[in-house]
Image: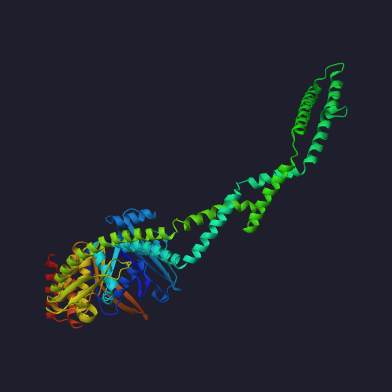
Amino acid sequence: MLTQLTVSNYAIAERVELQFNKGMTALTGETGAGKSIVLDALGLAMGGRADAGAVRHGAKRADITATFDVSGISEALQWLENHELDDDSDCILRRVISKDGRSRAYINGQPCPLAHLKDLGGLLMDIHSQHQHQSLLRKETHRKLIDEFAGAEDLAGQTREAWKAWNQIRTKLSQRQQNAEESEARLQLLRYQVEELDRLALETGEQTQLEQEQAQLSQADTILHSSHQAALLCTEDETSAAYLIRQALQQLEQLPVAIPALADTIQMLSEAQIQITEAGDNLRHFVDDYEADPARLTDVEERLSAIYQMARKHRINPEELPEFQQRLREELAELDGGEGSLEKLEAELDSQRKGFDELAGQLSEIRAKAAVELDQRIAGELAQLSMPTMQFVTHLNRNNQGDPASHGLEEIEFLVSANPGQPARPLAKVASGGELSRISLAIQVVVAQTSTTPTLIFDEVDVGIGGGTAEVVGKLLRALGDNGQVICVTHLPQVAAQCHQHLFVSKFTLQDTTYSKIESLDDQGRISEVARMLGGVDMTDHTIAHATEMFSKGQATHH
């Protein structure tokens, strides 16, 4: 839950520090005093859109910090751990907005993308505003609310992903069918090219080996002559290297006395004689065994010519031919009975459709059951809100056009009937502004009761409501607060009198500068504020007495 909010240089607030408790907290004050500052600041802490106008005049930046106790919120703890941002049981969201409109976001002191604030903020707070009255007129809002109420958001997401997969295959198949003639021509060309390369049967590294062999065979005479001459120089006559070294050894071996300093030299000459003799033997064997095969040279040159010609035909380097051949084989396999063939695509499309139908069917069953329960519970809330004859119907209209839709098998629309015997019709055609406000509140209260979000914020959802109905609204909000944390901005004394914590917002001017002030009221302060909300500027004894009675009754009632 939200435990603390600190706001610096935001709008007309220079510095505001607020502590929040469990239960229901009401924010009240004169119009224009700055009640929206708290909710707007929380919205920014949750990653909402910011602009330079949010920075207090004369300040360089606005700074908003919201602290939450997440010890009991497993999803938030898991999110923080996954992003390596966990820090005990507290979670601190911070947003800094510069006067040039740029902003920075932080989670537990670490800079983060704005999207992270939105993701994490959605697990910590849920804001219900009076502007949702208008969104309530849109069908996509109805579908979202029923899925949230049913706890089917994950299944709805899986259904959307299944639809995307099906639609991708459908698009690919359609393109392949439209280009069937081109695909067939490409298929024939690929078959011919692969067969031609298969006949060539070029192995990796073969070209290099053939080029080396061709170079040797084409210079056979030179190689033989040079090798024979080298053999002669090594060992064959009195001018050979072996003979000369032998003569040097004999000179040293015939010295009259042993010279230790020459021992290593004698050893080297002995080893050199052995090495040269072996080299000469190897050269003789090479010359004797060497075959200058003109026929083999012809074969090698013809093979190389075929390789070079094939490379020129495909406009690639010869060494790229094996890899090129593999790519053609893969493309051919895809077109000719592989994943890209019409038959394969049609089979995959059918498989994806079955997967979608299975998920969408499960989603439809869950939605249908949830719709019945939602209608019953909203009807109960509407009765408490002085609309006992108002019928609320969640209409699930099955899509019979054949193709799947990303949201499932049905369109969902909220319908109402204001009077018994009249058919249910869309909200926009039936409900007045005041009725729509109460219907919206009933829906939000019911949906909030099943919400796993620990902090629920209601921004003037009681607009257009008064009298005994206003007292019921207060009871509903307090009941939600008993099970978690509710923060609401209200103009109704009947609502304010029932809260657990009361924050009063006011503004004052000092040296031509306007400031906003938010203070937590004690019991006497709360009675005075309820009296102000009841009677305006001039508070009589009767107004004070009425406020005292309303406050006592609101606090004594257990929900």
* Nearer to us in this view, 553 or 127: 127
Instruction: Establish if 167 lies above or below 293.
Output: below
Q: How is the image coloured?
A: rainbow
Note whether 257 is above or below 543 in the view shown. Answer: above
Percent position of residue 539, x then y: 17, 81
Q: Position of residue 102 (x, y in %)?
A: 45, 70
Spot the residue most to the top. 256
103 left or right, relative to 200: left
139 up-or-down from 366: above or below: below
Q: Position of residue 397 (x, y in %)?
A: 24, 71
Residue 535 lies, with reference to residue 236, above or below; the image says below
Which of the 4 image quarters holds residue 366? bottom left
Q: Nearer the viewer, residue 4 or 220?
A: 220
Task: Residue 399 in the image: state x and y as whole percent.
Answer: 27, 70
Q: Can you name the residue that lies furthest to the bottom here?
A: 538
Figure disc tally:
0
Asked if residue 453 shows in the view, the reply is no
Answer with the quarter of the image where residue 379 lies: bottom left
**114 or 39: which is nearer to us?**
114
Q: Classify the position of the N terminus by image quarter.
A: bottom left
User: Which quadrant is the C terminus positioned in?
Assistant: bottom left
> Does residue 199 appear to the left or right of 419 in the view shown?
right
- At 64% from the left and 53% from the top, the residue drawn is 318
Res 30 seen here: yes
Name the side, left or right, on which 185 lies relative to 104.
Answer: right
Out of 452 and 140, give the one closest to the viewer. 140
